[in-house]
Amino acid sequence: MNLQPVIQVKREHRDYLLSRKNVVACGVGFKESEGRITDEPCVVVSVIKKMPEAQLSPADVVPKKLGEVRTDVQETGVIRALQGHTDRWRPAPGGVSIGHVDITAGTLGCLVTRDDQLFILSNNHVLANSNSAEKGDPIVQPGRYDGGTADDQIATLEDFVPINFGTSPPTCLIATGTESFLNWVARLLGSSHRVMAFQEVPARNLVDAAIARPLSDDLVEKRIFEIGVLKGSRDATLGTRVKKSGRTTGFTSGVITQIDVTSQVNYGEGRIAIFEDQLMAGAMSRGGDSGSAVLDEEDFVVGLLFAGSDTTTIINPIQFVLDALQVEIAVLLSK
């Protein structure tokens, strides 16, 4: 089936769709009719809550067609970054609790290699505290929420892909000069308030990913709890059956229901990040499962789980993760 025309239509209209108040994501999937999935590809629009058209302003109504391609509106709720296997493991497999020392807990995804060195793969918001961490910070297993302390350190943060929330430090001398002047005036007038300049940047992301270096290689192992050893990596598409092992919900399985998903993801404290070209599956995760490696039925890694809602799971395609961090999936070599 040639999905490219539908993907093209979705990409042409994604900003138009995401501008609607109730919309949180859009992707390419199969249309549902009377509770059954058909074989008609369409643009799937995910909303916080399905509402009658009469309760929506005209500007917030999702059109039934985009050109010649039909749409399908599905209720997902708010999509959040997910921050559970909660025991202390030595050696630690994929699928168990882990986290930066300052976060609650997420999931150890799997092991990867870079320049013949072994690393733990998980999310930025699990290992790097959503951009707030520094290389060398302690990583504990289990995560702090599950009782992990400094004595449970298993690794140090090595590298992460920054999450773009739409702002960055200013580079304009006018902006920084104005910031300094206004703060000088505020101090002069006795005000305790300050202003801060920032630069608006396109808030587009492909991955929420980070790696950590084990304190020693014998503290981790190349398997995933309840799944086994990995065979490598490859792409997933519509209809691919997938599975994962995570801290909170353990072993779960599902199906890729949408591809090329553009989604707004809520990281709390008012921070929203937009992710492009993601995979979407059904309800196979909950908070704490972030960082889980997602595998197909033949045990190839196809993605890295990082967000979801009560009805959906959002997954980074694995090749984006491997390319961004310049790593490869660590597999057991046959003897």
Image (cartoon, grey):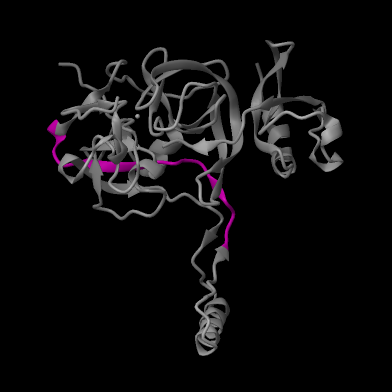
Q: Residue at x 23, y 25 (%)?
A: 222
Magenta stretch contains residue 206: yes
Q: Looking at the image, can residue 241 be seen?
A: no
Q: Nearer the viewer, residue 54 or 108?
A: 54
Q: Is residue 189 above or below residue 232?
A: below
**Quadrant of res 116:** top left
Q: Residue at x 15, y 33 (%)?
A: 219
Q: Is residue 216 left or right of residue 328?
A: left
Q: Which residues are magenta?
A: 200-218
Q: Is residue 75 above or below residue 140?
A: above
Q: Nearer the viewer, residue 327 or 262?
A: 262
Residue 18 at x, y percent in the picture: 69, 41
Q: How many marks?
A: 0
Residue 136 at x, y percent in the picture: 24, 52
Residue 184 at x, y percent in the picture: 51, 86
Q: Is residue 68 above or below residue 1?
A: below
Residue 138 at x, y percent in the picture: 23, 48
Magenta stretch contains residue 100: no
**Quadrant of res 275:** top right
Q: Residue at x 28, y 28 (%)?
A: 86
Q: Is residue 334 left or right of residue 199?
A: left
Q: Is residue 99 left or right of residue 206?
A: left
Q: Quadrant of the N terminus?
A: top right
**Quadrant of res 231:** top left
